[in-house]
């Protein structure tokens, strides 16, 4: 296990640094951590320092960055030269200082050189960090950084058969998706949530992947007969399903949504380590998204992380670090957004798999204290209100009853900028420390253009899915009922060449009735059809009704037979329906 250098102890009364360094064992973060502090407390700087230490120790980090501050981790300059800083300084900051950009860059370079030297950190340490880890800024829904194929998260998870694990991931995806279209859906009462969840579970359980256009198409004609004990059409009438499908299709048809389907796949393994095992710093910035978009992306990532985690072997070492900045909106004390469940799962279970979770917030009163009470390491900076302080002390007391809450509260009230109270896992006596100088240049959130420059070498030209103006499957007029079920002889599954696909249905002679098969028909597999297929193929169905009527013996009997010929060929053998 490595020791993370976070800063140095200080005398709380004098606010002077002592000669004692403040280090925290990497193993302590398997019991998770909390960083709390108001704006200007140095909370972001402490988070960056913690992540730098983890990466330097070879621990990969997955960062959820709703404000854009964590993108600064890509700004490390081993040469500490003014020319390195100049492209990244804020012109507004230079103007406030009464300097040109070059003058301000030189001052920043000098400040970073001096600040790092005060902690015994030289250019070689910065170079080692750059050599040890790879840094990637993901911008889902945008082409500024490395794209993230959010819709690809509907691929069936490999190596996962536990229905509970699949259910948790599906619940998160569906909740986030419905939030995007303005449906406030409860997993237990919302018919939209229940239908989509069952559709995805049906496909995943069969090992079949999905994409969003296909899922939307399945809403109109689900391959399901019942939901619970009710018939599908009673639970969710066809007219309402069509309206719901149109609502989802409106999302897909939006030109801006194509960016959500471009980029690298949402693969936690690949995001945490390169092909040669090098640790990665995966920064998922969502600052450019709406609140609903942030919820959707964050829910999907957390769901994938939980699924990935449960496939790992147990360990007491820190295998990976999840850092969530400004977590308040994702973990409220009363509401239950789709992000809340996976966060709570991670806080309760991730320790056994070596996954550490660090939550950061400036508003502890807006965070579920039950989650905070699962954290072993607390780092508390200046707080804005006594209410914030009391909520934090309540959570700390729940986590460790031996803490002198009054003493900690008094210490918090006297903190200065970049000063924090540290409560270690398993120890009741808190410490006061100041953070070390960050190796990264903390200039604030990067612009889209700056992110594009940093990620130019990593951006992938992933194909963009066609705008989902692609038509939905045709509605089902007078669907052919599957009863009574025919008993055809097995027929090999039809195979088609790509050249046989056409976007429109061929013309049919007048007078020939056309129907679409019910995808819930139990005999589809027997005739070689795929209920999960995405293309329509022609088949011939014959139905013969016979009546035996003999009045002399008072006998009346009806019989009905069905035959389905599929796939069709140039000649039909009536003996092989």
Image (spheres, grey):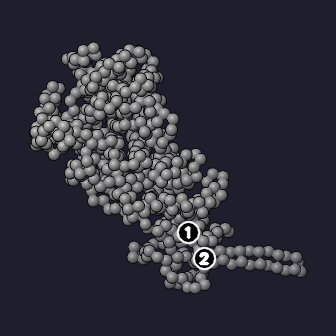
- Foreground: 291 or 520? 291
Q: Secondary structure at mark 2?
A: strand
Q: Position of residue 241 (x, y in %)?
A: 57, 60
Residue 27, picture quadrant: top left
Residue 167 falls left or right of residue 457: right
For mark 1, does the 10 Å Cα neighbourhood hold few (<14), some (14 to 19), or many (20 or more) residues?
few
Residue 402, picture quadrant: top left
Q: Position of residue 485 (x, y in %)?
A: 65, 68
Q: Which mark is residue 529?
A: none
- Foreground: 214 or 449? 449
Q: Earlier in the sequence, mark 1 or mark 2?
A: 1
- Foreground: 329 or 305? 329
In this view, the mark in front (1 or 2): 1
Residue ID at (87%, 80%)? 551
Residue 54 falls left or right of residue 575: left
Q: Position of residue 509 (x, y in %)?
A: 55, 85
Residue ID at (45%, 18%)? 401
Residue ID at (31%, 21%)? 415
For mark 2, does the 10 Å Cα neighbourhood hold few (<14), some (14 to 19), or many (20 or more) residues?
some
Q: What residue sits right under mark 2 in the picture?
A: 541
Picture quarter with the N terminus? top left
Q: Which mark is residue 475?
A: 1
Q: Relative to 100, does residue 404 appear above or below in the rendering?
A: above
Q: Position of residue 42 (x, y in %)?
A: 28, 30
Picture quarter with the C terminus? bottom right
Residue ID at (13%, 29%)? 114
Number of numbered discs visible in the structure rendering? 2
Q: Secondary structure at mark 1?
A: loop
- Residues at marks 1 and 2, CA–CA distance in whole angstroms: 19 Å
Is residue 426 something one can see in this rendering?
yes
Is residue 130 something one can see in this rendering?
no
């Amino acid at each position: 296990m490595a020791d993370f250098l976070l800063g140095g102890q200080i005398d709380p009364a004098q606010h002077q640094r002592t000669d004692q360094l403040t280090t925290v064992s990497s193993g302590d973060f398997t019991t998770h951590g909390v960083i709390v502090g108001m704006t200007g407390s140095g909370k972001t700087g402490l988070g960056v320092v913690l992540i730098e230490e983890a990466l330097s120790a070879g621990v990969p980090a997955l960062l959820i960055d709703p404000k854009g501050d964590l993108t600064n981790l890509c700004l490390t300059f081993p040469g500490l030269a003014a020319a390195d800083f100049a492209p990244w300084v804020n012109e507004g900051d230079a103007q406030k200082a009464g300097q040109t950009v070059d003058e301000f860059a030189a001052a920043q370079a000098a400040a970073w050189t001096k600040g790092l030297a005060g902690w015994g950190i030289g250019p070689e340490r910065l170079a080692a960090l750059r050599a040890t880890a790879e840094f990637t800024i993901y911008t889902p829904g945008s082409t500024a950084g490395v794209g993230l194929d959010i819709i690809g998260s509907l691929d069936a998870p490999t190596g996962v058969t536990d229905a509970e694990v699949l259910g948790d991931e599906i619940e998160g995806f569906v909740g986030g998706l419905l939030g995007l279209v303005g449906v406030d859906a409860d997993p237990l009462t919302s018919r939209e949530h229940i239908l989509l969840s069952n559709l995805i579970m049906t496909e995943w359980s069969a090992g079949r992947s999905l994409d969003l256009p296909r899922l939307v198409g399945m809403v109109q004609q689900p391959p399901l007969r019942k939901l619970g004990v009710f018939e599908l059409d009673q639970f969710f009438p066809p007219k309402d399903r069509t309206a719901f499908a149109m609502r989802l299709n409106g999302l897909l048809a939006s030109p801006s949504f194509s960016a959500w389907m471009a980029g690298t796949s949402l693969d936690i393994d690949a995001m945490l380590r390169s092909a040669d095992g090098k640790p990665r710093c995966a920064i998922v910035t969502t600052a450019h998204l709406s609140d609903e978009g942030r919820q959707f992306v964050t829910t999907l990532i957390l769901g994938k992380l939980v699924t990935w985690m449960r496939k790992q072997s147990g360990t007491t070492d820190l295998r990976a670090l999840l850092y969530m900045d400004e977590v308040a909106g994702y973990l409220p004390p009363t509401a239950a957004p789709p992000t809340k469940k996976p966060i709570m799962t991670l806080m309760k279970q991730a320790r056994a798999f070596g996954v550490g979770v660090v939550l950061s917030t400036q508003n502890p009163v807006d965070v579920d204290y039950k989650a905070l009470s699962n954290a072993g390491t607390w780092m508390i900076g200046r707080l804005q209100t006594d209410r914030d302080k009391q909520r934090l002390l309540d959570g700390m007391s729940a986590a460790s009853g031996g803490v002198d809450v009054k003493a900690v509260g008094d210490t918090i009230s006297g903190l200065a900028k970049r000063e924090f109270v540290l409560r270690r896992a398993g120890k009741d006596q808190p410490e006061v420390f100041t953070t070390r100088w960050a190796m990264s240049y903390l200039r604030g959130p990067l612009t889209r253009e700056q992110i594009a420059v940093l990620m130019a070498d990593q951006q992938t030209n992933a194909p963009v899915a066609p705008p989902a103006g692609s038509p939905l499957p045709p509605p089902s007029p007078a669907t052919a009922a599957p009863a009574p079920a025919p008993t055809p002889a097995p027929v090999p599954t039809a195979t088609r060449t790509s050249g046989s696909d056409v976007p429109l249905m061929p013309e049919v002679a007048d007078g020939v009735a056309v129907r679409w098969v019910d995808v819930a028909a139990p005999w589809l597999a027997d005739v070689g059809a795929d209920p999960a297929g995405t293309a329509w193929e022609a088949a011939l169905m014959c139905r013969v009704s016979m009546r035996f009527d003999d009045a002399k013996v008072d006998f009346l009997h009806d019989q009905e037979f069905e035959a389905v010929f599929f796939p069709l060929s140039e000649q039909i053998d009536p003996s092989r329906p």
